[in-house]
Image (tube, rainbow, N blue to C red):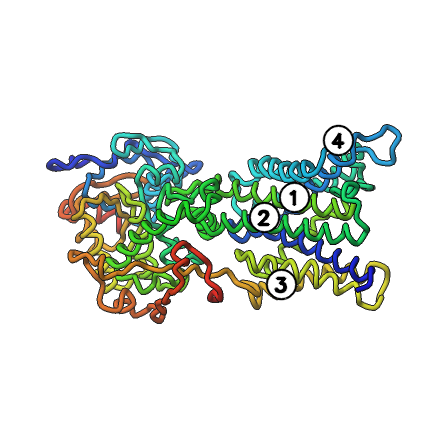
């Protein structure tokens, strides 16, 4: 495993994480660290176990064994809503917008612990939660402005294009103010020019100090965004290093050819 | 207006009120949270039986009807108890049925529970008098008010209307608040909602139990009016009448649910009473069920969002220019659409004039 360089401290530490489905070892004892304020790429051929690993970190898949530490606290096996409440945002491989909610509503849903978001506080009425809601709308408006999505604010999410849905997912995840953002193939189904725009956004978020762990197939994207790249094959980690190190490693080429 | 007409109209209005209330409860579960509660009628029935036994008094030994937990509670305790029993039963069934199963399997489990409940109550005659059911159930406040028959009918119309208003206030507060938005998020994409910190099981349970309470109260009001209740009143098909009402009226729209209650269980099924007698005995009744099924299929096929579709919540945005960040990376002018040749046509940016819309008010005339 590559040690994290410089003052960067580990945001995420995965230790001996496994997921077995009967005899199938989807993830077979992987260990790695993802640095604070860095973008870590998780790549590998189809069936390598990348999305399963991401699912275990996010809490949507229960690990068979192993540890997932976020800032030193073990979150392995916690349900995904509790992982999210600890500051882990995520996007999905397939579009996961709330189709019958507007873009703005999609974003407001991501606000945690907001007034009026429990049965008791909902019954207290609009007077109780209106000011908090307006503050949340302001935050959402800022994000939409930044992502040039303001014109879509009051449109239903199911009317958006594929690329806009990707942007919405990222905006929605950011609305929850995550410490760590998990991105599952954020460029899939996105045309090249919009992909470049999304990459610019992600670079800007990185510059602002957001830690990200990204599963991605597109090597140019990985090369541009990722400080550290982890190559998985058949449920295990083959190589963990920089893109230059990955490119020169024979095992990576073999894995892709075999995969 | 003749006494007969007044009696008929008040009866229809009371049924309408009960059905509207029941539809709001189911709408909260299905329309807003996506729970396919195919056992909904069981919770209404639990409320009806609770009201019955808590007003009939202790069962005499040599009576034509036997039941458990007989008591003679004063108004309005039997109605409140009916809601509580509907809620507790929902909590018990929800704990088993909603936790680990996917929504389609949950629907199957709930349908089976509905079938089992009917069989158990029919055959265990000691609980609620079996297939014969309970009769001579006292009407609320009838002896104390000393009204004429028609006078009491109108009183009951007003009472049901008042209950409807209270339930509507309750449901509207839930559905307008951020809590209602979370329920709709769970309905639309459970996994994504969970990834945003929403306790999906908890939210579904709250919606399920709240709907159960409303169903229980509606059952109590119904049985308080008709004074009799038996397993024949709550066969599993009755749940589908309420589902059809929601699908026809419009799911996730409280006005749509009320319209559906007016159109399907009241207007549509009532209209068939006036058909000339054709076919053998029970033919018209069987035809009602066929047409309820056809209505569901027809609307799902041609107008899946119902007569009054779920409204788009348009909210006013604060002035964007004032917030613009000089360091922000921006997409090309025209938004992501400009960079995405596969994108759908640029959507209209709605102009919002209603200041109340900021808080999620549903504006009139939502987009279909």
In three-dimensional space, the C-alpha distance between marks 4 and 1, rounded to whole angstroms, equals 18 Å
Which tag is nearer the camera, tag 1 or tag 3?
1
Task: Give coordinates of residue B72: x percent, y percent.
Answer: 75, 32
- The answer to whether the residue labelled 1 contacts the one labelled 2, judged by CB atoms less than 8 Å apart, is yes
In three-dimensional space, the C-alpha distance between marks 1 and 3, rounded to whole angstroms, equals 30 Å
The N terminus of chain B: image quadrant: bottom right
Given the image, what chain letter belongs to the residue carrying mark 4? B
Q: Earlier in the sequence, mark 4 or mark 1?
A: 4
Out of B117 and B104, give the one closest to the viewer. B117
Which tag is nearer the camera, tag 2 or tag 3?
2
Q: Which of marks 4 and 2 is nearer the N terminus?
A: 4
Task: Give coordinates of residue B360: x percent, y percent.
Answer: 42, 55
In three-dimensional space, the C-alpha distance between marks 3 and 4, rounded to whole angstroms, equals 44 Å
Q: In this view, does B299 lie to the left or right of B75?
A: left
Q: Can residue B70 be seen in this view?
A: yes
- Which residue is the site of mark 4? B71
Q: What element carries label 3?
A: helix
Task: Give coordinates of residue B55: x percent, y percent.
Answer: 75, 36
Label placed on residue B167: 2
- Which residue is the site of mark 1? B217
- The answer to whether the residue labelled 4 contacts the one labelled 2, judged by CB atoms less than 8 Å apart, is no
Packing grade of label 1 (10 A; few <14, some 14-19, many >=20) is many
Residue at (65, 43) in percent of width and height: B217
- The answer to whether the residue labelled 4 contacts the one labelled 1, judged by CB atoms less than 8 Å apart, is no
Given the image, what chain letter belongs to the residue carrying mark 1? B
Packing grade of label 3 (10 A; few <14, some 14-19, many >=20) is some
């Amino acid at each position: 495993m590559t040690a994290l360089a410089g003052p960067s401290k580990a945001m995420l530490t995965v230790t001996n994480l496994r997921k077995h489905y009967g005899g199938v070892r989807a993830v077979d004892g992987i260990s790695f660290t993802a640095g604070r304020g860095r973008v870590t790429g998780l790549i590998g051929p189809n069936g390598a176990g990348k999305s399963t690993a991401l699912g275990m970190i996010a809490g949507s898949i229960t690990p068979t064994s192993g540890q997932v530490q976020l800032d030193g606290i073990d979150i392995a096996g916690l349900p995904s809503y509790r992982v999210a409440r600890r500051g882990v945002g995520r996007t999905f491989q397939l579009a996961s917008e709330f189709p019958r909610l507007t873009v703005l509503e999609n974003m407001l849903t991501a606000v945690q612990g907001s007034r009026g978001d429990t049965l008791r506080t909902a019954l207290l009425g609009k007077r109780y939660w209106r000011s908090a809601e307006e503050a949340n709308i302001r935050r959402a408006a800022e994000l939409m402005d930044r992502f040039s999505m303001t014109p879509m604010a009051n449109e239903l999410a199911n009317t958006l294009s594929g690329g806009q849905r990707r942007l919405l997912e990222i905006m929605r995840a950011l609305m929850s103010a995550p410490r760590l953002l998990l991105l599952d193939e954020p460029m899939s189904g996105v045309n090249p020019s919009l992909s470049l725009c999304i990459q610019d956004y992600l670079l800007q978020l990185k510059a602002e100090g957001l830690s990200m762990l990204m599963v991605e197939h597109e090597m140019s994207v990985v090369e541009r965004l990722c400080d550290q790249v982890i190559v998985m094959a058949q449920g295990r980690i083959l190589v963990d290093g920089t893109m230059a190190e990955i490119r020169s490693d024979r095992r990576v080429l073999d894995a892709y050819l075999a995969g | 207006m003749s006494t007969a007409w007044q009696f008929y109209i008040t009866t229809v209005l009371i049924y309408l009120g009960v059905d509207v209330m029941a539809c709001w409860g189911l709408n909260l579960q299905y329309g807003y949270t996506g729970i396919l509660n195919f056992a909904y009628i069981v919770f209404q029935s639990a409320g009806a039986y609770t009201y019955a036994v808590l007003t009939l008094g202790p069962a005499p030994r040599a009576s034509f009807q036997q039941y458990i937990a007989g008591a003679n509670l004063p108004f309005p305790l039997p109605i409140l108890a009916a809601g509580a029993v509907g809620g507790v039963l929902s909590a018990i069934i929800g704990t088993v049925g909603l936790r680990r199963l996917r929504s389609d399997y949950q629907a199957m489990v709930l349908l089976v529970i509905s079938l089992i409940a009917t069989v158990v109550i029919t055959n265990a005659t000691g609980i609620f008098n079996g297939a014969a059911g309970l009769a001579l159930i006292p009407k609320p406040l009838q002896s104390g008010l000393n009204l004429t028959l028609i006078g009491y009918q109108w009183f009951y119309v007003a009472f049901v209307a008042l209950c409807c208003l209270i339930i509507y206030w309750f449901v509207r507060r839930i559905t307008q608040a951020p809590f209602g938005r979370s329920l709709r998020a769970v309905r639309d994409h459970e996994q994504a909602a969970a990834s945003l910190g929403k306790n999906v099981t908890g939210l579904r349970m709250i919606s399920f139990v709240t709907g159960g309470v409303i169903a229980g109260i509606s059952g109590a009001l119904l049985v308080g009016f008709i004074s009799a209740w038996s397993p024949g009143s709550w066969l599993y098909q009755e749940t589908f009448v309420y589902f059809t009402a929601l699908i026809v009226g419009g799911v996730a729209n409280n006005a749509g649910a009320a319209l559906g209650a007016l159109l399907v269980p009241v207007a549509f099924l009532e209209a068939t009473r006036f058909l000339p007698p054709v076919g053998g005995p029970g033919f018209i009744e069987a035809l009602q069920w066929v047409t309820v099924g056809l209505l569901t299929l027809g609307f799902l096929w041609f107008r899946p969002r119902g007569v009054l579709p779920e409204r788009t919540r348009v909210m006013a945005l604060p002035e964007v220019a004032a917030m613009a960040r000089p360091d922000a990376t921006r997409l090309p002018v025209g938004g992501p659409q400009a960079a995405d040749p596969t994108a759908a046509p640029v959507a209209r940016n709605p102009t919002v004039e209603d200041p109340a819309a900021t808080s999620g008010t549903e504006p009139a005339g939502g987009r279909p």
